[in-house]
Structure formats: structure tokens, C-alpha cells
Image (cartoon, rainbow, N blue to C red):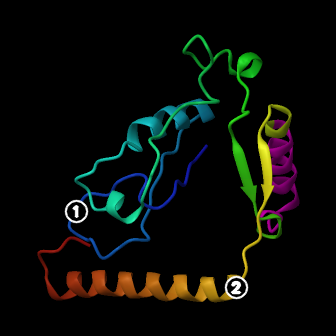
Amino acid sequence: VGLAPTCGRILFDGNVKSVTNVKGGPIAATVEDIALTYLLLGQIEESHFYPSMIRNMPPPHLDGIVGSSGTTSDTKTTTTTTTMRLGIFWDHFKDTDPEVLEHAVKTVRYLETRGAQLINVTIPHLREIHMAHTTKIISEFGISWEKAFFNKSVAM
């Protein structure tokens, strides 16, 4: 199981402040392990430059993962997701292999039965957003590689 959190949620160290599109996340054996790892890695450090880019970032939590006893073992019987809101852009969501889509839809439907609120999302001007994002990534990576190429003391 892997998790790709929002850019800036898991901090990157170093002095490369020009790169705002790099993100990383944990890989673990179970969803519960991912949740616990995210809880630890996703802590907000006000001294880091990421929190200044992302306003009102909520602290990570385990609501809906850890049951009333404080363990993950009773989540299947006692935990509801009445505070969870799922925003889904269905055109993008469905752009995958049929087997992946089948399991993803089953997961969404399961979360709905547990009380999650489903919100249909549409994203206008997606082509323009894609081009702008691509340009930003290419520019940031180009700056970082240029620094590394011309300054041998900068790690690549």
C-alpha cells in the first residue's frame, strides 16, 4: 500500500526551496501502517518553508482509522466516516484499468455506506492547468539541475 499525500504535507529537507512540486509518501504492508506512518511524517513544522505555501493545513489525524479502543482491530465494526467528505472527479477517476476501477468504486461505495459524503467535482480548463503545471515542473527542475551542474558541491 502506498500514499501520495498533498505536496508539502511530508517535509523535504535541504536548501532546494525552488522545488515546490516534489512530494513523497510512505509505502507499507497495510492501510493501518500507512495511516500511522502518515500521522508521524505529516506533522506540521512551522519553521519549514512548506507550511508558508499551504495555508490552514490541518494536522494529520487517525479519525476513521483507529477504533474506540485505540487500536485498528475494531475499525471494521465501530468506526463510521460521517465527517469524511470525498470529492471525486469521475472523468479522471474512471481513466484507469477496469480492474483498478472496479476496486476503487467498491471502496467509494463502502465509504458511503459508512457515512462518507460523496461530492461530485468537475475541473474546468483542465488542459490549461495541465500545461501550466508541466511548465512549472520543468522550470523548477531545470533550475535545480543547473545549480547542481555548475556547482559541484550541490547534491543531485
Asked if residue 88 lies left or right of residue 41, the reply is: right
* Image point (88%, 51%), residue name: 102
Disc 2 vs disc 1: Cβ atoms closer than 8 Å?
no
Asked if residue 72 is positioned above or below residue 41 in the image, the reply reads: above
Report the residue at 59% width, 89% height from top. 131
Name the quadrant containing residue 151: bottom left
Q: Where does the image place residue 109, in percent across and percent down from the top left?
A: 86, 42
Residue at horizontal 65 percent and vertical 16 percent from the top: 73
* Comes first in the chain, label 2 or label 1: 1
Tell which residue pokes out farthest to the top in this image.
69
Q: Main secondary structure of the magenta part?
A: helix
- In the image, residue 34 lies at what x, y percent? 54, 37
Q: Position of residue 82 (x, y in %)?
A: 73, 33
Q: Distance between the Cα atoms at labels 2 and 1?
A: 34 Å
Magenta span covers which residues? 93-110
**What amino acid type is highlighted by mark number 1?**
Gly
Residue placed under numbered mark 1 in the picture? 14
Q: Position of residue 20 (x, y in %)?
A: 39, 71
Residue annotated with mark 2: 125
In front of the other: label 2 or label 1?
A: 2
SS of the residue at dot 2?
A: loop
Nearest the eye: 51 or 105:
51
Residue 30 visible within the image? no
Q: Amino acid at mark 2?
A: His
Residue 105 within the segment the image draws in magenta: yes
Give the total number of marks visible in the rendering: 2
